[in-house]
């Protein structure tokens, strides 16, 4: 008589980390199964990176139509149907879910390092555009973190061209980065990364989670979720900004997304947008709910405006954010941070073939670099 034994469930997943390394999670090694909750998967990743300030981060995945989702810590992997339909194998992407309004105030160096890696990736991939002069400054801080102090014997002509900082990178920018790098002598990697974040946080698009939508007459808009509220963009220009304390409700039905805002006259106004699909609309709604909960001040801690909001009722979510809020994290005394004797292991960035430098007279090198930067800045679009 034949044996109809159940075949053991096997699960294989790759997590792509911000330093471009991969963490493999399997049934055999970590006991991960489809019945495992998302929180368990997240814990494995946090332990691997040695993160304690974990609530800023999450795991993303894409379905077959390239719609992005965040892994829900409260649900099993099997309940993430869009993920399960893509594998096996499965791919998750580790990254920042909630951008700290001031990343320089994060308590641990390892957390700031992960923010540095994410923001550097945002700049490189064009999600965080910046003026030419700022791009040069950010690039120099990144080089200082990567290579340390400028050394003419190690860092020969064109050494900056081995790294990538912005889309469509030009030689003039690389020359400007080299020139600024020479002035950063003595900055340790952690200090250079802190200066990088201090510069990047002032950029208009820092920490903006963009979602494409349609407005009146099918006009194209983007809704940007930020630490302070929701920003509306049309034709790459900001046309509206609504702060979290004034947003009284977010709602969706099919592809329609509603944002209800309390005006200065204490009257509510609803703004309606159309998402590209029902799935995209639900994702926008869930992200809005979680951002609102994470960043808003609780009623007993905020000003009289929030007390007025209580008259209009709560957000009435069916989906609820289950983690700690930004305020709770700042007040958490259960773990003494920063932890003593913590060493941050930094990974080397991907390198590319060195650009062949044009031959110039030695005396004109610095002048040419400054002239090249000026010409490159002139060609950039005005912010």
Image: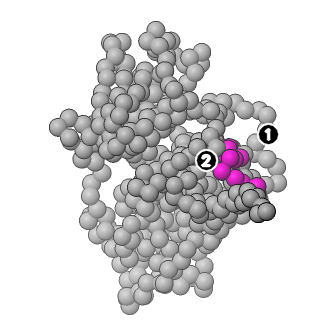
Outermost residue toward the front in this view: 1
Element on which disc 1 rests? loop
Q: Is residue 266 left or right of residue 39?
A: left
Label 1 Cα crowd, 10 Å radius (few <14 / some 14-19 / many 20+):
few
The kind of secondary structure the magenta stretch mainly shows is loop
What span is colored magenta in the figure?
30-40
Q: Is residue 294 above or below residue 115?
A: above
The residue located at (49%, 17%) in the rendering is 314
Q: Helix, strand, or loop for circle 2?
A: helix
Report the disc number at residue 336.
1
307, 359: nearer the viewer: 307
> Disc 1 vs disc 2: Cβ atoms closer than 8 Å?
no
The magenta stretch spans residue 331: no
Residue under pointer 2: 78
The N terminus: image quadrant: bottom right
Residue at 32% x, 33% y is: 256
- The answer to which image quadrant residue 343 occupies is bottom right
């Amino acid at each position: 008589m034949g044996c109809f034994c159940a075949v053991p469930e096997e699960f294989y997943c790759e997590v792509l980390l911000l330093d471009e390394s991969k963490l493999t999670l399997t049934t055999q090694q970590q006991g991960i199964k489809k019945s495992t909750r998302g929180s368990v998967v997240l814990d494995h990743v946090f332990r691997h990176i040695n993160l304690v300030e974990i609530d800023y981060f999450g795991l993303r995945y894409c379905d077959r139509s390239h719609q992005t989702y965040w892994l829900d810590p409260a649900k099993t992997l099997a309940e993430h149907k869009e993920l399960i339909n893509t594998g096996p194998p499965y791919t998750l992407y580790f990254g920042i879910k909630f951008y700290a309004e001031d990343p320089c105030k994060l308590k641990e160096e390892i957390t700031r390092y992960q923010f540095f890696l994410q923001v550097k990736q945002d700049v490189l991939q064009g999600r965080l555009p910046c003026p030419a002069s700022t791009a040069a400054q950010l690039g120099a801080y990144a080089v200082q973190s990567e290579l340390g102090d400028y050394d003419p014997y190690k860092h020969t002509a064109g050494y900056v061209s081995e790294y990538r900082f912005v889309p469509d990178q030009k030689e003039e920018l690389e020359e400007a980065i080299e020139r600024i790098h020479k002035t950063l002598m003595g900055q340790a990697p952690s200090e250079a990364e802190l200066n990088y974040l201090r510069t990047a946080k002032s950029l208009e698009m820092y920490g903006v989670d963009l979602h494409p939508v349609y407005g009146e007459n099918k006009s194209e808009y983007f809704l940007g979720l930020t630490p302070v509220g929701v920003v509306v963009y049309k034709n790459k220009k900001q046309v509206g900004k609504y702060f979290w304390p004034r947003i009284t409700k977010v709602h969706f039905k099919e592809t329609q997304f509603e944002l209800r805002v309390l005006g200065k006259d204490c009257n509510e106004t609803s703004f309606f947008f159309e998402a590209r699909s029902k799935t995209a609309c639900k994702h926008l709604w869930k992200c809005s709910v979680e951002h609102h909960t994470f960043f808003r001040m609780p009623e007993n801690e905020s000003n009289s405006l929030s007390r007025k909001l209580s008259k209009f009722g709560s957000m009435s979510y069916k989906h609820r954010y289950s983690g700690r809020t930004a305020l709770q994290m700042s007040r958490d005394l259960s773990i003494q941070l920063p932890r003593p004797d913590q060493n941050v292991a930094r990974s080397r960035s991907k390198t590319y073939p060195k650009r062949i430098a044009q031959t110039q007279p030695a005396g004109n090198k610095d002048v040419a670099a400054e002239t090249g930067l000026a010409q490159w800045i002139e060609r950039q679009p005005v912010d």
